[in-house]
């Protein structure tokens, strides 16, 4: 496994754990995932924002997470700007 693949797997596990801690109906800021992985300094977590986004999209495609924008689920392949991550809502 490459270093990038290992990092992405760690981010995915962390993202799912943090989303579960938030609970159903709550969302998570992706910067919280990056900070939890790399620490509080922006020089450490800032470069992780693209990998966090890529992992969020992959998990959304798997149906394990939902990407929200302005409180509504969005297409993981077609969203811009600020987003949040959450568990799929149980109806």
Image (cartoon, rainbow, N blue to C red):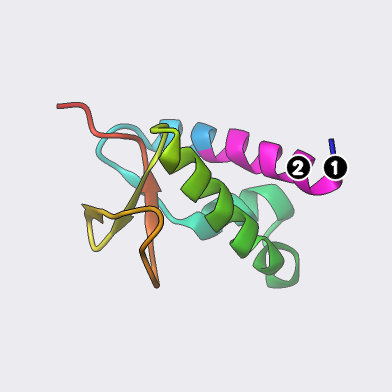
When the figure is inspected, residue 53 is found, relative to residue 12, above or below; the finding is: below
Query: Which residue is labeled 2 in the image?
Result: 5
Identify the element where label 1 is drawn: loop
* Left or right: residue 38 compared with residue 85: right
Contact flag, marks 1 and 2 (Cβ < 8 Å): yes
Query: Which residue is labeled 1 in the image?
Result: 2
Viewer-closest of 44 and 66: 66
Residue at point 24% right, 63% down?
Answer: 70
Residue 61 percent coordinates (x, y): 43, 40
Cα gap from disc 1 to disc 2, whole angstroms: 5 Å
Identify the element where label 2 is drawn: helix
Residue at point 29% right, 32% down?
Answer: 24
Q: Residue furthest front?
A: 77
Q: Residues within 10 Å of mark 2 (few under 14, many from 20)?
A: few
Q: Residue furthest right?
A: 2
**What's the magenta region?**
2-15
Q: Residues within 10 Å of mark 1 (few under 14, many from 20)?
A: few
Name the magenta segment's main secondary structure. helix
Quarter that holds the N terminus: top right
Quarter that holds the C terminus: top left
Viewer-closest of 1 and 29: 1
Quarter occupied by residue 52: bottom right
Viewer-closest of 74 and 37: 74
When the figure is inspected, residue 44 is found, relative to residue 55, above or below; the finding is: below
* Left or right: residue 89 compared with residue 76: left
């Amino acid at each position: 496994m490459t270093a990038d693949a290992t990092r992405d797997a760690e981010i995915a596990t962390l993202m799912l754990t943090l989303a579960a801690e938030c609970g159903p109906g709550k969302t998570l800021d992706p910067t919280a995932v990056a900070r939890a992985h790399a620490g509080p300094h922006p020089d450490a977590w800032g470069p992780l924002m693209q990998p966090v986004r890529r992992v969020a999209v992959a998990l959304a495609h798997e149906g394990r997470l939902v990407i929200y924008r302005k409180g509504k689920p969005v297409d993981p392949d077609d969203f811009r700007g600020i987003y949040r991550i959450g568990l799929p809502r149980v109806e």
